[in-house]
Image (spheres, coloured by chain):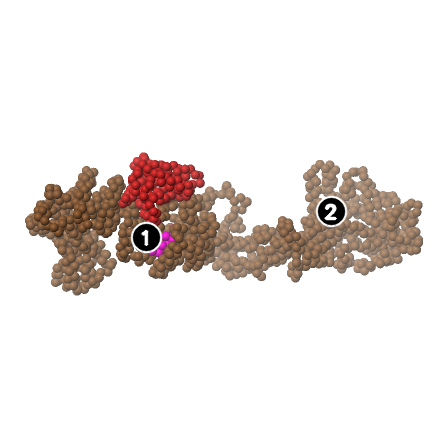
Amino acid sequence: MEPDVSMETGSMIRIAVLPVGGAIPHRQLREYAAMLGRQTRIDLSSISSFYKEHQKSPFAHQPWETGCLRFKYMLGGAPPSPWEDFQSCRKILAVVGLCHCPSSPDLDLVADQFAAACKGYSSALAKRCFAFCPTDSQLEDDGKKRENIILFPPSDRQTQEFHMLTMVQDLAATLLMEFEKWVLRAESTGTILKTPLDSQSSLGSEEVIKAKKRRLGRAQKTIGDYCLLAGSPVDANAHYSTAIELARLTGDVFWHAGALEGSVCALLLDRMDQKDPVLEEEVKYRYYTVIQLYRRSYLQDNAQRVSTVSFELEAALKLARYLCRRELAKEVVELLMGAADGAKSLIDASDRLILYVEIARLFGTLGYQRKAAFFSRQVAQLYLQQDNACAAISAMQVLTMTSNAYHVQSRRANSKPHTSPHELGPSHGDGGKLHPQSVVSLFESQWSTLQMVVLREILMSSVRAGDPLAAWSAAARLLRSFYPLITPAGQSGLASSLAKSAERLPPGTRCADPALPFIRLHSFSLHPSQTDIIKRNPLKKEWWTGSAPSGPFIYTPFSKGGTTNTNKQEMTWIVGEPVQVLVELANPCSFDLIVESIYLSVHSGNFDAFPVSVSLPPNTAKVILLSGIPTKVGPVSIPGCIVHCFGVITEHLFKDVDNLLLGAAQGLVLSDPFRCCGSGKLKNVSIPNISVVPPLPLLVSHAVGGDGATVLYEGEIRDIWISLTNAGTVPVEQAHIALSGKNQDSVVSIAHDTLLSALPLKPGGEVTLPVTLKAWQLSMVDSEIDSSKSSGSTRRISKEGSSPVLVVHYAGPWTHSDQSNNTENSVPPGRRLVVPLNVCVLQGLRFVKARLLSMEIPARITDALPKQLYGDKNPAEVVSRDDSMVKIDPYRGSWELRLLELELSNPTDVVFEVNVSVQLDNRKNEHGMPILNHENADFGYPKTRIDRDYSARVLIPLEHFKLPILDGSFFAKDSRASDAFCSKVSNMAERSAKAELNASINNLISKIKVRWHSGRNSSGELNIKDATQPALQASVMDILLPDPLTFGFRLAKNGATAQINGFPEESIISGDPPSQCVNGSAVKCKGSISAHEMTHMEVLVRNNTKEMIQMSLCVACRDVAGENCTEGNNATVLWAGVLNDIRLEVPPLEEVEHAFSLYFLVPGEYTLQAASVINDATDVLRARARTDSPDEPIFCRGSPFHVHVVGTA
Amino acid sequence: MANTACFIIVSRNDIPIYEAEVGSAPKKEEAAHKHQFILHAALDIVQDLAWTTSAMFLKAVDRFNDLVVSVYVTAGHTRLMLLHDSRNEDGIKSFFQEVHELYVKILLNPLYLPGSRITSSHFDTKVRALARKYL
C-alpha cells in the first residue's frame, strides 16, 4: 500500500530526488528540495519550446493549451514496487540529483556518484543532477559539459527559482518525448506485463494461452497509464475502454479493475474543474465496481504470497478521499470502517500502518477528531511495535497529534498565548461565582482513563525516541492531572522519570507544562506600607480626608455609579519597595518534592521577583511568602509563578488551579490537591489590579528603648519616645499626627510641633517625638472574668489591641520633578503610618470602696495645749509643716468633721506609695477672705505605703470644701428644685437638679488627687471619681454648704479678749483677728477655768448668709451626764445674764456677740452648746434645712464646746 | 450474557459520568482502555447521527474489529453507549430504556449536579443487574 493515494495518483509522474556528492547541510537540502517541490504541475504550453516531435505523437488528443504534467517528487527515492507493471505510475520515471557544490568540489566525482545512484532506478527515463552554488572554478570547469549535471549559478532566490522552473520544464519535455517513444514501442512490439498475482512457478500450457489472450488488454491498459502520465486523458480513456473490454472478455478481473480505475482518473482529469453530481454519481458507481472487482480478484490459493486486499483498500480510500465532505460523512464513514475492517487481512505490518494513517487523516479531514485520534493511536501502537528510535519518534509525533482530541495537549501546543493579561481576567472577574453548569463545561471531555493511557504512551514513546523534553512534559502532565489515580509507586516512578529526563536536558530548560507542586494564590501580604497609600486630595489642606469613607456607612447612595462595581480591589505598589505575596503550595504525591526555586511570574517586565526554594514532604501543603521589587511605573499582572522543579523551569498559572479547585468543589475533578494535603478551603482570592507608582517617602517608626510593649499600671503616666525615620528616597514634606483606636484619651499629649519643625524630612532623616501616656483603667468586664478564675491574686492585663494608635499621614512633594510626562491630575499619593502605642496595662492599685465618715469632735480646753501649733502666725506654713493626717484643731472649737475614707488594695507584686493631695482653687475661705498666698494650695498628706497583697485606707478630710457663704446662688436652681420637691411633679426639674448635684460632686472629687508611686519611675494617679461618687451622693450638700449660722464661745475674763473661739467650720486659716485671739486665749486658757469663780463668757453668732437673720438664741450647759446644769432643782452651774430666748438680729456676713457669765459649782467637764431658732426664714434657709413646710421653725444648732473646770469641789 | 460489553454514560459535555465493564469475559485493564478508546471515538459519529433521527436508540453506530457500539441518546443529549460483541439488538434496546429510567431517577436527585459523575452504588448495582438480564 502507498500512503496519500487519491484518484489522481494515476496521473502523477514519480521522480526520485537524491542528494549526491558531499554532505549537504540540512538547511540547504531543505531549501533545494522545497524549490524543486514547488514545481509539481508543469503546463504543457510551457514545455512546448523544449519539445521536439521526432515522429508522430501517439497522444493524438493531447491538450497542449490546457493540459499539464504532474510531478510527484519522492525525496530519497523509493524501492521498486512489484506492481510497477500493473500501474505505471508506481514506476520511478525520472531521477533528480541535488548537489551542493561547496561541499563537493570535484564535479566528476559527483557525476560518477549520480550515475551510480541512478542505476538503482532502471525504470527512470530521464536523469538530471542540479548543482547549486558552484564556485568560480567549478563554473569555469563547466566548459567540459558533463552530461546531466546542471550548474545553478549563484544568484538571488527569484532568479534561481526561474532557473529551476526552466530546468524542470526541460525535464518534463524530455519525459514527454520518452513516453511517446515507449508507447510507440509498446504498440508495435507488445510487451509482457505481469503482476505478482500471476503464478510464476507453473507455466502450464493453459496458463500460457490465457496469458496470451490477456496480453493485449494489459498492453492497452498500460498505454492508457502512459497517456495519463503524458497529460492526455482523452487518449487514456480510449485505451482504457479497449482494455476494459478485453479484460472482461478474458476474465482478467484484476486488470479490469485497474483499467476501470484508470478510466475514472482520466474522467476526472478531463473534467478537471467541474464537480457536478452526475459526475460524482458516475465516479462513485465506477469505483464501487472497482472495489468489487478487486475483491473478486482475491485468490485464496496465493493469499499468503500476494494479496489484492491492499488494492481494494486503496480503492476504498481513494473513493473516501474523493467523497470526503461533511454532507457525505455517513458514506465516507462506512467506507473507512470497511477499510479498517480490512486491516486484519493485510499481511504487511507497514501496509496496516499506512492504512491506519490514511483512515486517521480522512477522519481528520471529515472533522471527526476523536475518530482520527483513535486511529492515530492505532498507528502509534504499530510504530511502537517496531523497536527502533525512528519509529518511536514517529509514534511520539502521532500521539502528540492525538493529544488535542483527548484534551491532554501540551500547553505549548495551545495556540492561545497565556501571556495576555486580558485573558486572565474573566475567570476572576465574576469573583469566582461561576454557574455550576459553566463549571461543568470547564472540564469538557475529560476521559481520565484515556488521557492517562495516552499520556503514558507519549511518555513511553518519547523516552524511547530520546526526546527528554517531550518525556518530561508528558510525565509532568500525567503526574499533575492524574496523581490521585496513580499508585504511590507509580508516582515515584514518574518523579524519577522526570528527574531522568531533566538530566538529559540542558540546565535552564523551560517547559510549558507545569508539574508539581500545585500553587494557588493565598493572599497578598498586606504590608502596612502598601495598604496605607492614600490618594491625595490636592484641594484640601487635610489631603487625607475624603479618600476614605468618612461617614459611618460603607455604602452611600450618592457615590458615583462607576465605583459600585469595583469588586476587584485596587492595589498600589511602589517602585523600589519590596512587596510580598503569599502563595500556597501543595504536594499531594507520596514523594518528597524539592522546589529548587519559585518566584512570581510577571509578564509586564517591571518587577524583580526573588526566588526561594522550598521542600515539600509527601502530602503536605505549605504557605510561602514570595517577594519582589517593582522596578518601573505601570500596571503589574501576576498570572502565576515560575517554578524550577525536577530540573525544568515551568510556569504555574493560578487560574488553572482555581479552575481545578472549582471542579473539585463540584465533584468533577478527581481530587482537590490542597484538601488532600490537609489544607483548608480557601476563599477564591482574586488577583487585584496592581499598579506601580513612583517612589514615595516611607516613614518607619520605632519606639525609643525598644519596640516591646510598655508595661504600665493603671493610671500610670509616662512619656514614650517614638522615632520616625524616612526610609524612602523622597523627602517627607507634609505630616500630620492623629489618634485612633481604643483608649484614645489615654494619650495626654503628642509633640506635634517637633514633627512639624522637622519637615521636610530628608531621606534617612529621623525625628523623635515624645508622647505622654496615662494608662487607662482596665474595664470591669476583665476583672470579673479574671477574679472568677483565680480569686485572690488576680492579675489583670489589658487585652491586646486595646492600645491607642497614632496615625501619621505624610506625603512627599506634590509633583515629581522627573515625572514630567504625568498629567496634572496625578498627584503622587500620600501615605499613612500607623504607630501602635504598645502599652500593656497592668492592674494597679485597686480601689475597694469609699466611705464618707462623719464625726464630731468637740473643742476641748486642757492644760496640755500644743502651743507650737499656733506659734507661727502664718497658717500657710503651719499647713505646710503639718504632718498630721487630719487637720483637727481641737482647741479652737469643735468641728463636724467629714472624712472620705478610701480603701485601696494592692493586688500587684510591687509596693505602692499613695499620696493624697487636695487641690484647692484660688477661692475664698469661709470668711470671704482670699486664701493667703495659696494659689495652688495643695494639701499634702503623708504618704501611705501599701505592700503587695495588702489593703490600706486613706482618709481625706473634706473640711475645705465648704462654700464661704450660704446664699441663693447655689440654690439658684435649687429654689426651683425645692419647688419640685414640693410638687413632685416635674421630673425634668428633678433630673436637672440631680445633674446639678452630680456636677458639684464631680467638681469636688476632681479636686482630690490620689497619686501613687511605685518603684523608681512608675507614678500615676488613681481614678477615684467613679468610686467616690456614690459615697458622696447622699451628703454632698452637708459637705459643701456651710451652716447658715455658726456659733462660738469665748472667755471674756475681766473684759479682756480671752476667748474660746469657735467657728466650727472655720479652718485654721481663718482671719487674723481670731488667730490673735486664739493666741491670747491660749495664754489665758492655760490658767484654765476654776470652779467657784465667776467666768465671763461670750457667745459669738455669725451669719453666713447674705441676708439679715432674726433669731432667738439659747445657750445650754450640760455636764458629762448630759444633764442640763443651769436649770432644774439641782443645778450645778449658776449663771448671770440671759441664756434663753435671746433675741438677736445678725446682719449678713457679720457676727454678733452676746455676753453672759457662768459660775461652776463643781469642777469637771461641761459642755456648752448654742442653738437658735430662726424667725422668718428665707427660702434659702429652708432649702438648706431641707424642709418644705413654710410654717416649720428653722432650728440651728451649734457645735458643742468642752469646758474643763478645775478646782476642788 | 455477552462476552464483552462495556457500558458508559457520557454527559452532554462529553465527560464520561459512569463506566462499567459488564461483560462476562475476565476483566483486563488493557481491554478496558481499548473499550473506552473505541467508545470515545464513536462519539464523533453519534454526534452527527443523533440529529438525523427522532429515535433515541441509534442502534449500532460504529464498530471496530468485531466490537460494535450501540448508542442511546436521551433528550438532554446524554449518551448511553454500549460496546458489545453480541448482536442482540432487542435486548440492548431494553437495557438502554431501563438504564435511561434509572438515569432519570438520578437526575431527579436535587443534590446531583447534572453533568457530574454518577457515584451512586445503587445505580451501579441496578445497571449491572440489567446487563445480566438483557445482554
What x and y, as percent, mark residue B103? 39, 39
Callout 2: chain? A
Front residue of B35/A88: it is B35
Front residue of A209/A811: it is A209
Stretch in magenta = A470-481
Name the quadrant of the C terminus of chain A. bottom right
* Chain A palette colour: brown
Which residue bears the numbered disc 2? A1036
Residue furthest top in the image: B54
Picture quadrant where residue A437 is located: top left
- What is the number of callouts on the image? 2
| Label 2 crowd bin: few (<14), some (14–19), many (20+), radius 10 Å | some
Whether the magenta-drawn stretch holds residue A6 is answered as: no
What x and y, as percent, mark residue A966? 77, 46
What x and y, as percent, mark residue A590? 42, 55
Q: Going 48% across and 59% down the picture, which residue do you hit?
A: A729
**Residue A688 visible in the snapshot:** no
Say what secondary structure mark 1 lies in. helix
Q: Going by the image, does A1177 lie left or right of B51?
A: right
Going from the N terminus, do you reach mark 2 or mark 1 first? Answer: 1
Q: Going 86% across and 45% down the picture, which residue do you hit?
A: A1114
Picture quadrant where residue B12 is located: top left
* Chain B palette colour: red
Task: Indicate which disc residue A1041 carries.
Answer: none
- Amino acid type, mark 1: Glu
Which residue bears the numbered disc 1? A457
- Amino acid type, mark 2: Val
Q: Going by the image, does A189 lie left or right of A1174?
A: left
